[in-house]
């Protein structure tokens, strides 16, 4: 319904005069007449008795006037919120729900502290965290299920995505403390002779490691892909092989002696890309 019709209806009910209503709303008197007739036709009832002394609301008009004023009040509140600022809060502050997708390593390490801080500084934001691998996170952006995602990627080249790096995550090779390479320098050739437990396909740093190992001469390395960092970490702790993970995901295990660092060939820290559609 065109709320301009309701505004004219409310003004006419207050003034009782088509002429006064036209003057108040800066309309031609004929426009006021047309708008009232249009509203009566839409609602299927007569709203005014046209008398020589002016316009008098009918019983239906009196009943509907309160409802019309409620609609006009709601419209005024809506416009006030929109004019208050760029945010979604009634006072112009940033507010509303945000669906954030991120990989397991970030969900289990940095994000709990970040979200707690965000709730103190921006209490109007209702952030929902969705653990997801890179492929699922990007699909979530494209379907609208996710508003933002954090990707551990060197580059985000998809034309429909906008990304900017906000942090860098150092990577580390780890093995069980009793592994022959634990605490030692290791070349690519030595690493290629080991079993590796790596993250699922689509993880940029795991894919880079796999491509490098497979390009080396000699027998192909033994590679097992996991969708869970915890699963890869558990296999390595049991002495079954090595893995490459963000250091933040194994800091506690390294400090407590459950895992040991292998000083393999340098791999640059992987950027954390804040990505939106």
Image (cartoon, grey):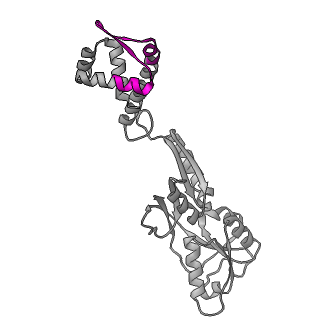
**Residue at the image position 22 percent from the left and 23 percent from the top:** 28
With respect to residue 33, does 247 lie above or below? below
Residue 187 visible in this rendered orientation of the protein:
no
* Highlighted magenta segment, given as a residue range: 36-64
**In-front residue for pair 219/61:** 61
**Residue at the image position 48 percent from the left and 40 percent from the top:** 95
**Residue at the image position 30 percent from the left and 25 percent from the top:** 34
Q: Check the picture and name the quadrant holding the N terminus.
A: top left
**Looking at the image, which residue sits at the far bottom?**
218
The magenta stretch spans residue 151: no
Q: Position of residue 267 (x, y in %)?
A: 53, 76
**Looking at the image, which residue sits at the far right?**
238
Residue 106 visible in this rendered orientation of the protein:
yes
With respect to residue 232, does 141 lie above or below? above
- Count of residue discs: 0
Q: Position of residue 238 (x, y in %)?
A: 77, 72
**In-front residue for pair 114/79:** 79
Residue 216 picture quarter: bottom right
With respect to residue 146, does 6 lie above or below? above
Q: Position of residue 29 (x, y in %)?
A: 24, 20
Q: Position of residue 61 (x, y in %)?
A: 43, 15
Q: Check the picture and name the quadrant holding the C terminus.
A: bottom left
The magenta stretch spans residue 57: yes
**In-front residue for pair 263/208:** 208
Residue 32 picture quarter: top left
**In-front residue for pair 96/59:** 59
**Residue at the image position 59 percent from the left and 61 percent from the top:** 103
With respect to residue 149, does 55 lie above or below? above
């Amino acid at each position: 319904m065109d709320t301009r019709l309701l505004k004219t209806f409310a003004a006419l009910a207050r003034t009782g005069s088509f002429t006064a209503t036209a003057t108040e709303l800066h309309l031609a008197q004929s426009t006021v007449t047309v708008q009232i007739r249009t509203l009566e036709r839409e609602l299927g009832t007569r709203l005014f008795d046209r008398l020589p002394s002016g316009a008098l609301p009918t019983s239906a008009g009196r009943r509907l006037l309160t409802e019309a004023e409620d609609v006009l009040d709601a419209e005024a509140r809506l416009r006030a919120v929109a004019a208050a600022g760029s945010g979604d809060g009634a006072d112009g502050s940033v507010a509303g729900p945000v669906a954030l997708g991120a990989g397991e390593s970030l969900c289990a390490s940095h994000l709990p502290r970040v979200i707690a801080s965000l709730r103190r500084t921006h209490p109007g934001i209702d952030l929902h965290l969705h653990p997801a691998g890179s492929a699922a996170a990007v699909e979530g952006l494209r379907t609208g299920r996710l508003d933002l995602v954090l990707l551990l990627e060197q580059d985000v080249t998809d034309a429909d995505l906008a990304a900017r790096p906000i942090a860098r995550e150092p990577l580390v090779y780890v093995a069980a403390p009793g592994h022959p390479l634990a605490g030692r320098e290791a070349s690519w050739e030595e690493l290629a002779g080991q079993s590796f437990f790596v993250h699922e396909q689509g993880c940029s740093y795991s894919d880079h490691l796999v491509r490098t190992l497979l390009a080396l001469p000699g027998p192909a390395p033994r590679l097992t892909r996991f969708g869970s960092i915890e699963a890869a970490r558990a296999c390595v702790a049991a002495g079954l092989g090595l893995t490459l993970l963000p250091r933040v995901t194994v800091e506690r295990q390294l400090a407590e002696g459950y895992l040991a660092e292998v000083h393999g060939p340098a791999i640059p820290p992987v950027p954390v890309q804040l990505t939106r559609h």
